[in-house]
Image (cartoon, grey):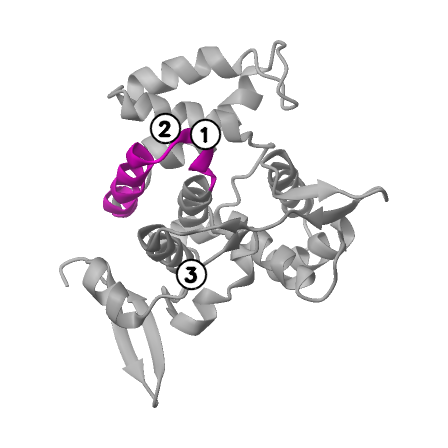
Amino acid sequence: MMDKRHKKLGIKQTIQKHWMDRTVQMMLAGMSEREIRAELDEFLKTQKQSGGISQRGEKTYGMAIGILASWFAPDSDLVPFRNDVLTLARSLPTEQWLPLHWIIISASYPFWFNVARQVGRLFNLQNQITQAQVFGRIKEQYGDRETVARNARYTVRSFVAWGILKNSQSKGCYEKFVPISITDSDVTILMFESALYAVPEAKGALNLLLNNPAFFPFQIPIISGDYVSQCSDRLEVVRYGLDDILLVLKKKGN
């Protein structure tokens, strides 16, 4: 199951946040997967990626539904995780859902997470980044293929559409917005869990997760390993060395 996710790219067009919001709203209204797919079919046929209205090709909006399905039809091993994120969405206003969408897509599509990580790494070095820098790093990881560049381009455009990156005065250059402050520790734990789904080894040091460049759009509160252990049934907290803590995704049945 983990291997299947890591082999797919999947970000085949720019994803708008309001499409994600609409999907969650339908789920919270109790609609079935079949009903949601039918509703999205009709909705996306008339949506421009810029937010306006026009006719869209069936193939194009079909690609969009593939990403939106990370909410309403995730891989079977992600269902309990998705359910916990959906519970949080129920208690938050729509304008605070962006971190939840980030969590869900990162867990379902590691490519999204990896593009974000490369973007974050570049911002750790400089105030502006370029498409060429991001695409170069992604090609080093996935290979120099047109599909890799195209999927990376759509992912970066999605970041812009979500108000995470902004176009600078120079074409092909981006700046980042002020990070979104995460105040809910439960959101933070689910963010860490999404990162573990997005890496093949399914584990990571807590101090590195707190500073993971893939979370560059967010300001994350410091939480302890003890708190994670108390609040999560799917994460194992392993202590090593003197003060180091490792978070590991528990295997089914553990």
Q: Which residue is mark 2?
A: 24
Q: Which residue is mark 1?
A: 20
| Distance between the alpha carbons at the discs numbered 1 and 2 | 6 Å
Tell me if mark 1 has few (under 14), some (14-19) or many (20+) residues whose alpha carbon lies within 10 angstroms of its own.
Answer: many
Residue 245 % position (x, y): 34, 77
Image-based side of 156 in relation to 205, left or right:
right
The answer to which quarter of the image holds residue 20 is: top left
> Which residue is nearer to you in this view: 79 or 178?
178
Q: How many marks?
A: 3
Q: Residue at x 60, y 32 (%)?
A: 14
The answer to which quarter of the image holds residue 133 is: bottom right
- Residue stretch rendered in magenta on the structure: 77-98
Vertical arrangement, residue 254 with respect to residue 59, above or below: below
The numbered disc on residue 166 is: none
> Which residue is nearer to you in this view: 91 or 168?
91
| Distance between the alpha carbons at the discs numbered 3 and 2 | 25 Å
Q: Which residue is mark 3?
A: 221
Residues at badges 1 and 2 in contact (C-beta under 8 Å)? yes
Residue 93 % position (x, y): 38, 31
Q: Secondary structure at mark 1?
A: helix
Image-based side of 233 in relation to 12, left or right:
left
Residues at badges 3 and 2 in contact (C-beta under 8 Å)? no
Viewport quadrant of the C terminus: bottom left
Residue 9 % position (x, y): 53, 45
Tell me the kind of residue under disc 2. Answer: Val
* The stretch drawn in magenta includes residue 215: no
Q: Residue at x 36, y 24 (%)?
A: 25
* The stretch drawn in magenta includes residue 81: yes
